[in-house]
Image (cartoon, rainbow, N blue to C red):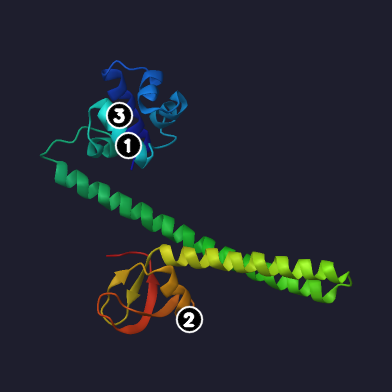
């Protein structure tokens, strides 16, 4: 989505309704700073407020997301373009998340091992040793959990048996035997238990 184009469209529609930024903000129960941010392309309306914004400007959500009034004639092609763009943005975000997962996993390992090594090798009072080892353990395990959560939600898992792509539950991912990002799980489509590999694209 083109935030600059959408921002200019919001500003154009607001002026057409003879509303100032402050007046529109009052209708939406937000600050005029948020309106300014949208109109300059530095942000997008939150999904929770999008419908109220469209009602205030007398446009529909499809118009807002395209940054222009969409006629019925080109509605289908515009919708397909928007879906394609959103799909590309999700893929890019998922790739970034999976890179972050690797970084979190490495840091968690370093913290876990570091706390254990420092607590075990350096001379210090017993209570200090216990605190350092416990802190390293808690931080390391917390990091591993966040990394696992990222792996579960970013992208999809593809069933080797039927090719079905899906997002499994966190429980299924946690309990599954794995080799890297490939996990042995039961496919919700074919019901077979086999190795499912992590993929970015659904199509």
Compare residues 200 and 147 and report the one nearer the observer: 147
Q: Is mark 2 on a helix, strand or loop?
A: strand
Q: Nearer the viewer, mark 3 or mark 1?
A: 1
Residue at 30% in and 50% down: 85
- 3 or 1: tag closer to the N-terminus: 3
The residue furthest front is 127
Q: Nearer the viewer, mark 2 or mark 1?
A: 1
Residue at 35% in and 41% down: 47
Above/below status of 61 relative to 23: below
- 2 or 1: tag closer to the N-terminus: 1
Give percent across and percent down for residue 22: 41, 19
Above/below status of 92 relative to 40: below
Q: Quadrant of residue 2?
A: top left
- Left/right of residue 27 with respect to residue 57 in the rendered view: right
Q: Residue 9 has which mark?
A: 3
CA gap, disc 2 to disc 3? 49 Å
CA gap, disc 2 to disc 1? 42 Å
Above/below status of 105 relative to 48: below
Q: Residues within 10 Å of mark 2 (few under 14, many from 20)?
A: few
Q: Residue 179 has which mark?
A: 2
Q: Residue 50 has which mark?
A: 1
Q: How crowded is mark 3: few (under 14 residues within 10 Å), some or many (20 or more)?
A: many
Q: Quadrant of residue 18?
A: top left
- Left/right of residue 147 with respect to residue 6 in the rendered view: right
Above/below status of 151 relative to 189: above
Q: What element carries label 1?
A: helix
Q: Residue 128 has which mark?
A: none
Give percent across and percent down for residue 195: 38, 82
């Amino acid at each position: 989505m083109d935030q600059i184009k959408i921002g200019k469209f919001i500003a154009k529609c607001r002026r057409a309704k003879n509303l100032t930024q402050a007046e529109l903000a009052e209708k939406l129960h937000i600050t005029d700073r948020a309106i300014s941010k949208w109109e300059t392309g530095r942000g997008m309306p939150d999904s929770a407020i999008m419908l109220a914004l469209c009602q205030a400007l007398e446009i529909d959500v499809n118009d807002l997301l395209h940054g222009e009034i969409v006629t019925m004639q080109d509605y289908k092609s515009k919708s397909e373009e928007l879906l394609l763009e959103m799909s590309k943005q999700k893929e890019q975000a998922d790739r970034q998340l999976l890179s972050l997962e690797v970084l979190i996993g490495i840091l968690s390992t370093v913290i876990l091992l570091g706390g254990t090594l420092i607590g075990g090798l350096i001379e210090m009072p017993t209570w200090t040793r216990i605190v350092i080892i416990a802190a390293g353990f808690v931080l390391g395990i917390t990091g591993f959990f966040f990394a696992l959560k990222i792996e579960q939600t970013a992208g999809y898992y593809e069933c080797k048996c039927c090719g079905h792509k899906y997002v499994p539950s966190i429980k299924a991912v946690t309990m599954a035997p794995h080799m890297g990002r490939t996990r042995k799980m039961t496919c919700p489509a074919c019901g077979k238990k086999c190795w499912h590999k992590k993929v970015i694209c659904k199509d």
